Image (spheres, rainbow, N blue to C red):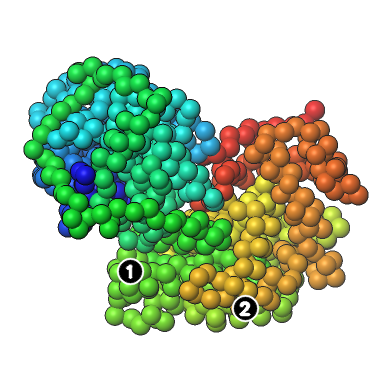
Amino acid sequence: MQVLTVASASVNQTPLAWRRNVGNLIAAIEDARNKGAQILCLPELCITGYGSEDLFLSRWFVAKAWSMLEELLPATAGMIVGFGIPCIARNVLYNGYVVCADGRLLGVVPKQFLAGDGVHYEQRWFKPWPAEHATELRESYLPDCFQGTPIGDISFVVDGVRIAVEICEDSWVPQRPLRTAALSGVDLVMSPSASHFALGKSEIRRAILRDGARFSSSIVLSANLLGCESGKMIFDGDACILDSKGVVAYNELFSLKRFGVVCASVDIDSGRIKQQGTASLRVEPIPRSQEIEVSGVLSFEGVNGITSQIRECSVQPMPYFEELWQAITLGLLDYAEKSSSRGFVVSLSGGADSASVASLVFLMFQRAIREIGKEELARRLRLNPAQSADEIMKSLLACIYQKTANSSLATETSARELAEFLGCDFGVCDVEPIVSSYRELAENFIGRSLSWETDDTALQNIQARVRAPSVWMLANIRGALLLTTGNRSELSVGYATMDGDMCGGLNPIGGLDKPLILRFLRWLAEEGPIGYGPLSPLMRIISSPPTAELRPSAAEQTDETDLMPYTILQAIEREFVYHRRSPEEIIAILDREYPLSPIQEWVDRYITLFGRNQWKRERAAPSFHLDNYSLDPRSWLRFPILSGGE
């Protein structure tokens, strides 16, 4: 039995934060070394960050990344370590993965299949590497020590252990490179990724990894990035080790720490025995030019004292809402720190959306206190670490209820009770005098009185807009990040006021539809996160129908009377945006599901409003990508600003 101790690591990186990124990588390597690891897999593009966007097109940026790699080489002494890095070969840019051993670079494996769907635009920057092709790197931007490095569809043999590399999207396609590598015999696969979070996706990813380990009878080291790297995508930090039976070891997802390392001792011989007994395996020799050999790096341990560590472990899927709140709270902390913000400000309306945002900030605070400590949280957000936890919470989050003549006592009470439960800074501001002054200015200008019969939209919107300056001012005074609170359903049909309730630097729930938010709030109110308990004041909020409270109370305004039932709106949105169906197809589908409803009227209204309000989505604050689709025109959905009409 040949036993190796191997490791996978997640790291929380930031584009252009070179020193921080290198520091995280060195810390992860040292942690893996201290745990006895001989081989370590780090994530895709971990030196630069996956979300570097058009920076990848700058030659100086790629050169800087390789100078950082030169600094990292000494940290690999006595180990095999893989790093993700962009690479230019003959003026073509590739998404590469370098394998280093004992302080020297062995070779570069470029990605063969590029992600180009949903939030991904890899083809804008990178080119796919052709299978079964290899050459040498000789480029002016490279440090001298890297000239002549092998690059291509290559594998590595270190002290007899055959190592292949399969980068993220390469694993998700039918013709994945591992299928070819398996025919030549492979002991261990490095599977680095920058696989963005979406609800339920981690289980799909692990299923793909398990499939690769099973059909290749090899050890798979999977490493994903961690955190809200560059503003929208969140990475779950999934690092796991698998063999042909399943997951051997895995780390916690959505960690608030800078990095996470998972280690396991694995039996290399067991995979070889399985390959030997596989009747369908036809070994196809690899040309020597595509197989890099090195020796004197690995030492193998015997059976004694090791066999107890070689075992399959049971991986339970994370519950749906647990995934959701942990992903968003990780994103909130990262976004605040990386934008140099000292906390958050929320305009708390007493409704579901703003309540969910404020509650998520509170849960972020609770998580941070447990996982990284009060002092580290204060340091990251430039707060006073000498304060008590309660004082830090007040410094972290300020909520303001801004009422007009159309605001109700019920929503004010709901907002106040929630704020008291959360322990945040809270205040009430009466903006009705400002509304009245603007109304008077407009009436003087147009020479007539405004009325709800003739000026409904203007009278509603001015109430939303006058709230913006004061809440922006509060955010500026505190050096905080103003969070906007519109949900995806509202953005879908433009049920929001530009320069009013859409104001803010980040929208944590902009990727979630209204029915999902209401279910999430009920879960928070009745059950709550594991180990944290329920947020009971939310019960008052979810028991009231959603309303903007912009018309007089006698109008009994609700969101669904203004629009349509949210469940219908969400069903239309999903068919139109995600499944890309025509209005006629949507009507036919929903007519069967809701036979007594005016489906055609609602579909026509939705399509009209969707097209008319693309300009609002173009100007909306950034939001986290949380579902398997979004309306973000700068990432998931490109849609014309002008559409429709005759």
Q: Position of residue 590 (x, y in %)?
A: 81, 43
Which image quadrant is residue 124 in? top left
Front one among 287 and 281: 281
Secondary structure beneath disc 2? Answer: loop
Say which quadrant the C terminus sits in. Answer: top right
In the rendered image, the vertical position of residue 442 relative to residue 413, given as above or below? above
In 3D space, how far apart are the residues under numbered discs 1 and 2 (Cα atoms)? 27 Å
The numbered disc on residue 537 is 2
Say which quadrant the N terminus sits in. Answer: top left
Q: In the rendered structure, which amino acid carries the disc numbered 1?
A: Ile
Res. 564 in view? yes
Q: Position of residue 605 (x, y in %)?
A: 80, 43
Residue occupying the point 80% across, 39% down: 589
Secondary structure beneath disc 1? Answer: loop
Drawn side of residue 298 relative to residue 254, left or right: left
Q: Residues within 10 Å of mark 2 (few under 14, many from 20)?
A: many
Q: Residues within 10 Å of mark 1 (few under 14, many from 20)?
A: some
Residue occupying the point 60% across, 53% down: 512
Q: In the rendered structure, which amino acid carries the disc numbered 2?
A: Pro
Res. 54 in view? no
Residue occupying the point 33% across, 81% down: 387
- Residue lying farthest right? 596
Q: Position of residue 440 (x, y in %)?
A: 72, 64
The numbered disc on residue 372 is 1
Front one among 377 and 324: 324
